[in-house]
Image: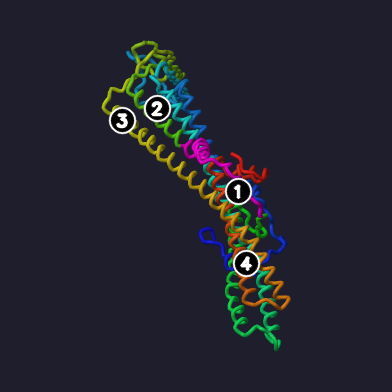
Amino acid sequence: MTSSSPPVKLLLFLLMAPLLVGEERVLTLSQTLERVLQVHPLVTASDLSVKRGEETLERAKGRRYLAESDVKLALGLVPSAKGDVFSSHDKSDDLDGLGPFTKMDLTIVQPLYTFGRIKSLITAANEALRMEEAKGRLTREELALETARLYWGLSLFQKGEESAKDLRKNYDKLVQEVETRLQKEDSEIDDTALLEIKSGLYAVEKGYWEAKEGREAASGFLATLLDLPGENPLRAQGETLPLPSEGELSLERVLAIAKGRSDELKAADAGVRALEAKWRLTRSNRMPLFYLAGALGYAHAGNRTDQTNPFVVDNFNYFRLGAFLGVSWNFNIFQGNHEATEAKLEYRSALEKRKALEQKVEGEARERFHELRKEAALLESVRTSLKSAKTWLQVSFDNWDMGIGEVNRLVKAYENYYKLQGESLEREYKYNLALTRFSSSVGGVSLLMEWMKNGKIVL
């Protein structure tokens, strides 16, 4: 449905009918976009990625205080042991006299000076979060763009189906009218005229069925996207979009806005900064780490003699408390140098990719700018031609009623008018898509809502 041209070109004798909603559920573009951004799983997934980034950032910030803290607790039973290192009636493998045993060891390490390790770690986590946020906005924008495309397609097929219904009815009337006039003795119509008109039956039926099936398919696709299974068929309200004013849009300004507001570039920028922080972190890892360490230990087993001799290691009865200043330094500078070089190359590669992405964003904005101007011009042109074709059809029809017109001239006027009517619908569809894509480049599809509300395209 989305890749092929609409079938409205094939609709002969196109007549517009009032909108019949019946059991259908009518949606505006704004309601459709709001719904899809509430229920689509990709939106939920991007929100979860942002929350994960927030947790990673908090964990990185936690490295500033008590970077390492460890508590070990033990509860159990141990055999009795009386005496000391010089004399004891108990043996090391005795299992008698079991009694309760408790033990607790606490160790903490507070970084004092890390040569930028923690700062780089926090920066990397913060930029990773910014990247996830930009990706989330980009996901929403791409989803909104796809949803709007389906919405405009549904709107087009609706008009095609409604018009095709009237087309079939008016086609039958025209055939009957020609057959009636053919039976008159003084009729200027011959059998070839009737055959020419009847040969258009296939085009009439083809246009009807393509429009009908296209509308049902578009409604089903949109219902799935909006998570509305089992609901009544969807119907687009069919809003009208404003046309750009002459000289209102400047390519230079459009390109500047597109690059400044692109979430793709914002995500890339955050990714580059995160890799830069990673590079700095690998360089810091080659430097020493100064820290303050503290330890607290306590153990008690009442059925064992407490060994007070400081040169005797007693793992069952003790109280220890201490603190010291320490330095940790990984002297494997060769490994550290390789890690720093790898990180630097990764950072530089991201910088080059960012430049390429900027070119892509600019090229896409340029393409959408020219596409918008082209589609706006063609839409206005076909509407002007349609007015002339309508006048021509009216004159030909009046002449036919007065008996002075030729049937082939009337058929030609009909064909020309309804061909342009179909072209008008197709050009409107393509213009709606062009303006939607353009709004996505210069501020998001939400900007389209403002333009629709104000009836004017303003940057």
Where is residue 330? Give x, y as percent.
31, 23
Magenta highlight range: 238-267
Whichever of callouts 3 and 2 sits on the residue coming sooner in the sequence is 2
The residue carrying pointer 1 sits among few (fewer than 14), some (14 to 19) or many (20 or more) residues within 10 Å by Cα, namely many
Which mark lies nearer to you, 3 or 2?
3
Is residue 232 inside the magenta stretch? no
Residue ID at (36%, 11%) = 310
Residue 162 in sight: no
How far apart are the alpha carbons under marks 1 and 3? 45 Å
Which mark lies nearer to you, 4 or 3?
4
Element type where label 4 sits in the image: helix
To which residue does mark 2 refer? 95
To which residue does mark 3 refer? 341
Quadrant hosting residue 187: bottom right
Do callouts 2 and 1 mark residues in contact (Cβ within 8 Å)? no
Is residue 244 inside the magenta stretch? yes
Residue ID at (42%, 18%) = 111
Whichever of callouts 4 and 3 sits on the residue coming sooner in the sequence is 3
